[in-house]
Image (spheres, rainbow, N blue to C red):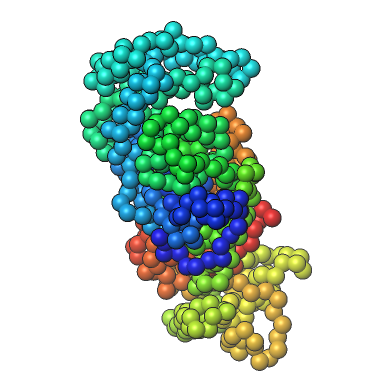
Amino acid sequence: MSHVDNEVRPSNFIRNIIDEDLKTGKHTSVHTRFPPEPNGYLHIGHAKSICLNFGIARDYQGECNLRFDDTNPEKENIDYVNSIQQDVQWLGFQWSGDVRYSSNYFDQLHAYAVELIEKDLAYVCFLNGEETREYRGTLKAPGKNSPYRDTSVEENLALFEKMRKGEFKEGECTLRAKIDMASPFMCMRDPVIYRVKFAHHHQTGDKWCIYPMYDFTHCISDALEHITHSLCTLEFQDNRRLYDWVLDNLNDFQLPNRTRQYEFSRLNLEYTLMSKRKLNELVVRNLVSGWDDPRMPTIAGLRRRGFTPSSIREFCKRIGVTKQDNLVEVGMLEACIREELNDNAPRAMAVIKPIKVVIENFPEGELEYVSAPVHPNHPQMGNRELAFGREVYIDAEDFREEANKHYKRLVMGKEVRLRNAYVIKAERCDKDADGNVTTVYCTYDPETLGKNPSDGRKVKGVIHWVEASTAVPAELRIYDRLFKDANPAAFDTVDEVLNSDSLVVRHGFVEAGLVNAKACEAYQFEREGYFCADMDSNPEHLVFNLTVALRDSFA
């Protein structure tokens, strides 16, 4: 069912329902499904649903199907199908049997639509979109019947056959369920269940020119696959009435133990949009580099930024499954990856905004090597050897000509320790025409190698560095929130809330051992944050993405 290690089984209201169903014999096994629409990449909200559906199937030794809700071919393509499969497997799960598609059932869905017509429970309606909305009524006023509602069964069968043959234009007519135009639930006011659409389908080609609507397709697909517990987010709560109505009125599904729909709260995450339509807008308008841009909340984007499958699964476990909508702090997601990387990411040094330090009393043209742990808490991970020479780079933020007593880095006339190496003292500096420091001239004490110098000298500050002649140039992408407001969905347009500083590109240096860093491989750049090599990184052009800062700056 999954490649996920055994984890503590969470408790929630859905699992309580399943426990009761198994106890009473309503079901003898558990069968769930994950039914994404292939019209975009999956995001962190989908990860919650993946972990829920596949996790339940795993814990109850049941099955979970991957079924694509592919009823809208104009917005779907095979690239999305492939990316979704990759994301599910990357998260550590495997679906039962073959990948399924709603389009697998198009012949059966058509037959069930005919059955509803024959029972006088569906009719072909020629109201246009605007007229249909007008006839539907409002939340306060009931709708009124379509003038085509009382068309005879025989004529409706003939009209629906003409729809199937492509004899009507798109938008000219629809097939609607005949339920109740006075229902307090808008979804029950004779909803459309089929529409005309002349579009090539990525699975069925040009076989069909009529396509079923989601609410008609979903419940039947669940029933055909013998899904026991159909788990949806809360926005489908009212639609459960239509889900049941369709199955109640089809002969094949009038069973006491058939599938039932249960709703849980969707994931709403701070500084994030969960609308695939709006995420697609960001991509189409080139406001991001693509669906896998590390600023995007997509699983592909999180992967490229350096998040791990286990950190995302842990996040989904921590937020839990409830019926209560809320806005989850993004710090919870970041804490999950930070805790994991703090424990297992190898350490390295990188200088993001470099200035040169010349150690004037170190011999010219010579190098020596100092040893540093790969991870300070895991000696079994070994040590790495760092070149040390007359010239090194430090970060511009780590030097000041003058500073108060709270500044514990390099100050003119004072000492600081280079991490895992020597104590140096700043003597003088060069500046450019704008007054920016370009080079700091220092002396070093050769008796101070290591963390605990024998002379007992107390040096308050420790800074990171890389040796200049062996350092490797690197592009360092510093990511921030894509949006300036914690709830960007509350704004009318993305432009109002887009953070223009969500990506800052720096050109710095990393220690030589990172020249062959693999894509998505994580490191803690000491004193800077957790970074990973980008998918486009190579030895000739190293690129590292900031995954997460060392601490939560939003806390």
Name the residue nearer the viewer: 257 or 8: 257
Image position of 455 with respect to 221: above or below: below
| The C terminus: image quadrant | bottom right
Residue visible at 48% across and 21% down in the picture: 179
Residue visible at 54% across and 80% down in the picture: 378
* Percent x, y of residue 143: 55, 14
* Percent x, y of residue 492: 58, 29
- Would residue 40 be found to the left or right of residue 241 on screen? left
Farthest residue, direction bottom: 454
Residue visible at 63% across and 62% down in the picture: 551
Image position of 517 with respect to 206: above or below: below
Q: Determine if residue 436 is in view.
A: no
- Would residue 216 be found to the left or right of residue 237 on screen? left
Farthest residue, direction top: 147
Residue visible at 43% across and 12% down in the picture: 149
Name the residue nearer the viewer: 491 or 531: 491
- Would residue 325 be found to the left or right of residue 303 on screen? right
| The N terminus: image quadrant | bottom left
* Percent x, y of residue 271: 59, 44
Name the residue nearer the viewer: 280 or 504: 280
* Percent x, y of residue 202: 27, 37
Image position of 271 with respect to 415: above or below: above
Q: Determine if residue 502 is in view.
A: yes
